[in-house]
Image: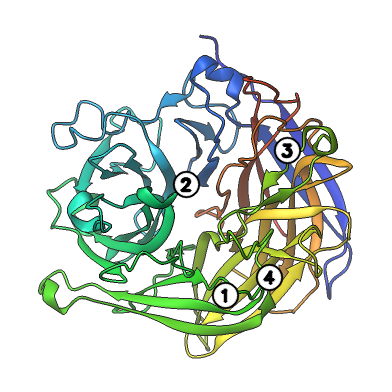
Amino acid sequence: MSMKRPAFLWVPLSLLLAGVAPAQISVHSLEGIDASQLGGRAGFNVGANGAVGTKQYLEWVNTFYQGYDKTTLQPVYRSPVAGNTPWYGNPNTPDCSGGAGDVVILFDHLASRWIIARHQGQNPYFYCVAVSNTDDLTASDFGWYGYELALNPLLGQNSQGVTYFPDYAKIATWPDAYYATFDLQDVSNKYQIVGTLVCAFDRLNMLNGDPSRTPQCFRYPNVPTGSVFLAHSLLPADIDGTNPPPVGTPESFISIQNPSGLATTSNTLNLWQFHVDWTTPANSTFMGPTPLAVNTYTPGCYSVSNPTNTVCVPEPSTASTHNPIDSVGDRLMHRFAFRQFLGSSPYQSYLISHTVRVGTTTNQATGIRWYEYRPGGGIVNSGTIFPGAANYRFMPSIAQDQVGNLAVGYSMSGAAMHPSIKASYLSLPQGSTATEFAIRNGSADEQNRPNWGAFSSMTVDPVDDCTFWYVNEYFAVNQIGSNVTWQTRIANFKIPTCP
């Protein structure tokens, strides 16, 4: 197969930065993996995410990955690579060679290594983690250290003895472990979420390719009652930059607190903390939830009768097809981005974002709510991005650069607007107003499915610690019938105030 040449897009935008003179922000983007490259192997659920490393950008779509050179933007591999490759043929991971689900790609900033993690979607369930042996995808000796964890003994069972399904797995990097989370779904009750499982993986030994110590896991509630778990989809904190948190800082997790009963609003998020002790595992603890007070919100597309049904985003074709798309508004969105700031007054800053309803009725639009959490101070900054009443903004991902510029990417769609890729930025230290700009304007709709991936991914270049990289999906050709026509776009940009 011939090398795919990426379609480049360079967009100069004249933007006014708060407190400074007008400046230019340049958005560079390239075509990522498209369904057309995968032939009949492309599915409807894209799951586009990725991360930027020291030399390349690595993108995932269900169920393939591709790397791109950061300078030339050329693809690393002649065609997208099958998603089970990091584990295939490894005698230590015999249960990780099949299909993949809920894949997350990260770059470990503190160790300069790639991480790919996924769960094996058929019972018995396994969680598969691969750690690269170098930061360079093109190195002659590049390879993966593969690990697997049998999940069934950890997941628990419902009253009929059926093992809960591990869904929406997420993983993050921290100095003392790689931390993963799973929703527990009751397959006997329409896959209702009844709890969560969190696990710590032995990062130290995994980075060296050595046998790992037994992962340490906690389930909450310890014995799920079968009722709806409204604090689901915990996200572990993931490090940006190369400054680690103070030694001994426990890993933090955050989750939404969906409304309960007949309520449609909430004013709380949930904070959890995991302290792992590899020497004496009995001393490890998982604590929470601790409520974090926030401004009142209604989750995107929220329905009292079915809290996890968040399908309401219109497309131009919705009026005729009656097919809206999913805002994924019942949970906080990947990533829970952490950054350690140094200087005379060091502090820790965590960012998170999600989709919220803007208005008072079910059919009104959605916007992007973001928060900054600081230990000891709670939620110290927040805002809602919604510069207009017509369109729906949803499925965000957030990060910040080394000087505190926040950037959040997301999808946007409406009755007169095809699903598109947008982003906004602001300065946290200056308290500036968010400025929105376009990454890729869609020209077609997803007419045959409501699924719109499940998350997207904003990451920060570990070399200059300024350049943001974002990936999401869009359509240039209507997806109808049994056709699969999605495309993905990878963009990078830098806020001029970052040195």
Residue drawn at 58 percent across, 42 percent down: 453
Residue of label 3: 323
Q: Secondary structure at mark 1?
A: loop
Observer able to see residue 189: yes
Q: How far apart are labels 3 and 2 at the CA level? A: 41 Å
| Location of mark 4 (residue) | 298
SS for callout 4: loop
Mark 2 nearby-residue class (10 Å; few <14, some 14–19, many ≥20): some
Q: Nearer the viewer, mark 2 or mark 4?
A: 4
Contact flag, marks 2 and 4 (Cβ < 8 Å): no
Residue type beneath disc 3: Asn
- Marker count (numbered): 4
Image side of residue 479 versus residue 64, left or right: right
Front: mark 1 or 4? 1
Q: What residue is at 65 percent from the left and 69 percent from the top?
A: 370
Q: Depth-wise, is mark 3 or mark 2 nearer the camera?
A: 3
Q: Disc 3, disc 4: CB below 8 Å?
A: no
* Secondary structure state at the residue bearing disc 2: loop
In 3D space, how far apart are the residues under numbered discs 2 and 1 (Cα atoms)?
A: 48 Å
> Which residue is label 1 attached to?
261
Q: Do the CB atoms of the residues marked 1 and 4 lie less than 8 Å apart?
A: no
Q: Pick the quarter of the image with the C terminus.
A: bottom right
Residue 54 is tagged as 2
Verify CB contact (< 8 Å) between mark 2 and mark 1: no
Three-letter code for the amino acid on which mark 4 is drawn: Thr
**Regarding mark 3 in the picture, which secondary structure is present there?**
loop
For marks 3 and 4, give the CA distance: 22 Å
Q: Nearer the viewer, residue 92 or 150?
A: 150
